[in-house]
Amino acid sequence: MSVSEVLDKVDSGVEASLEILKAYCRLPSVSAERRAQPETAAFVRGLLADAGFEAREYTADGGPPVVFGQRMLDEKRPTLLMYQHYDVQPVDPLDEWRHDPFDPVVEDGRFLARGCGDTKGNLIAQLLAVKAWQQVAGNPPINLKFVVEGEEEVGSPHFPAFVRDHRDLLRADGATIEGGDHMTDGRPKMELGCKGILYVDLVCRTAKVDQHSSYAAITPNPAWRLIECLETLRAPNGRIRIPRWYEGARGPTPEELRYLRKTSLRVQDLKEYFGVRSLRGGSDPYRVVRTLVYSPTCTICGIVSGYIAEGTKTVNPAVARVKLDFRLVPGMRIEAQLQKLLDHLRDRGFDDVEVVPHKEQLQPSAISLKERVARAAIEGARDACGTDPEVWPWSAGASANGFFNDELGVPSLSGPGVSYDGSNYHAPNENIRLTDFRLGARHAAAMIGRF
Ligand SMILES: [Zn+2]
């Protein structure tokens, strides 16, 4: 028995798996609308049972079911936990879809349906990998667990309670979260963590009421005041000016940089896609990726004050507000960074600027390239695709890695996946490429073999 036999079995199972994916995507499991949750959970339980898992549904605090399945072969062998969610995003604007989002279509080498990339296709591809092992060897060589929740797209409000009550079920030697992307050229992309996010509003109120702007000679203006404040936060080159901001931030290791030097990111494509003239990092893909991954950011997401509609209105406004997101790299902690921001504003005399932190914060977190799960994913990608994967030490976005790494104590990464950067997550015409579906399933099979 060799891994190549398992990979051949994966290839020959792709067609049948795409039919299963169609049935899965026909279930309109939009969590924001609480649609089709019990029937989709039951469908997922059936999929797991068909693939030889002991599968059950759990409910916590009135939330929709969490589906859990396991194939425990031998306590002495390592255990891989795979996390997915069966819910999807709402579909509006509906008239921008070329097809009914819940009636899957295959055209031009792509599979289109809401949820096919985020993240129903990942589950089906991973189960195809398990079934290929079963056909060739009778069993996968390791213990496997799946946990599939139904509320990820609305912030997983009940999942922490499930985890708290069933910590034992989720014990594992490594975890994969949803699925990784592929690069435009088809190389699988792996992210060993994520940045975190600290989101705050800054509000500056300088008067009880708006005033006729003739009074501006003697009354303060909150927009100018907020601009002065913002200028103390960030330099024009993007560097954050808040004292001690970078303390603790994890820098690159030589091994991480070795992978980043092989990036197949297409800088020109990215510039054209965004319609921007230049990127920080220049035109060298390695420098662009390195800057993207390792730079903490401070971004004005929106800013508003006074009158901005048609024509003129001579007003001196009473209040100005800005929404700021700070992306944090692993090694930073949300609470500490917030304190540094508050200290800075106090020290610089901005007591008139109120800081309102939002609830939606995510800690940054990343594992080392030396972890078993990281090595298995990288070696598995080489086996499955015949090429080095694209490996980033963490993603530029925020994700649930911290929850697995730090709270559950299971080292995690974004696992073998089926999507690519044109998959239109959360947007109309969500799609995956059929080639990525096959490669994602092969990658999952090979990773199981290497774990
Ligand atoms: Zn999503």
Image (cartoon, grey):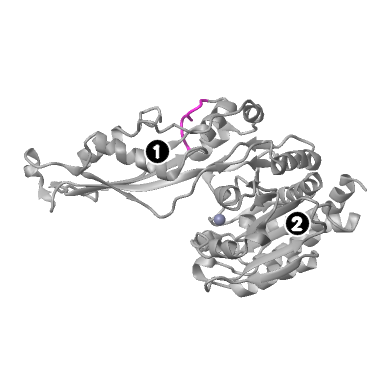
Dots 1 and 2: beta carbons under 8 Å? no
**Which residue corresponds to the image point at 65% horizontal and 65% vertical from the top-left?**
25
Q: Quick one: 348 or 130, which is closer to the camera?
A: 348
Query: What amino acid is labelled 2 in the image?
Result: Leu
How far apart marks 1 and 2 lie (CA) works out to 40 Å
Q: Is residue 393 visible?
A: yes
| Stretch of the chain drawn in magenta | 275-282
Q: Is residue 116 visible?
A: no
**Whole-percent x, y for residue 442 in the image:** 78, 48
Badge 1: residue crowd in 10 Å (few <14, some 14–19, many ≥20): many
Residue 84, located in which quarter of the rendered image? bottom right
**Whole-percent x, y for residue 200 in the image:** 36, 47
Mark 2 highlights which residue? 144
Mark 1 highlights which residue? 298
**Which residue corresponds to the image point at 76% horizontal and 35% vertical from the top-left?**
387
Q: Secondary structure at mark 2?
A: strand
Q: Quadrant of ligand 1?
A: bottom right
Which of the two discs, 1 and 2, labels the residue nearer the N terminus? Answer: 2
Q: Is residue 337 left or right of residue 363?
A: left
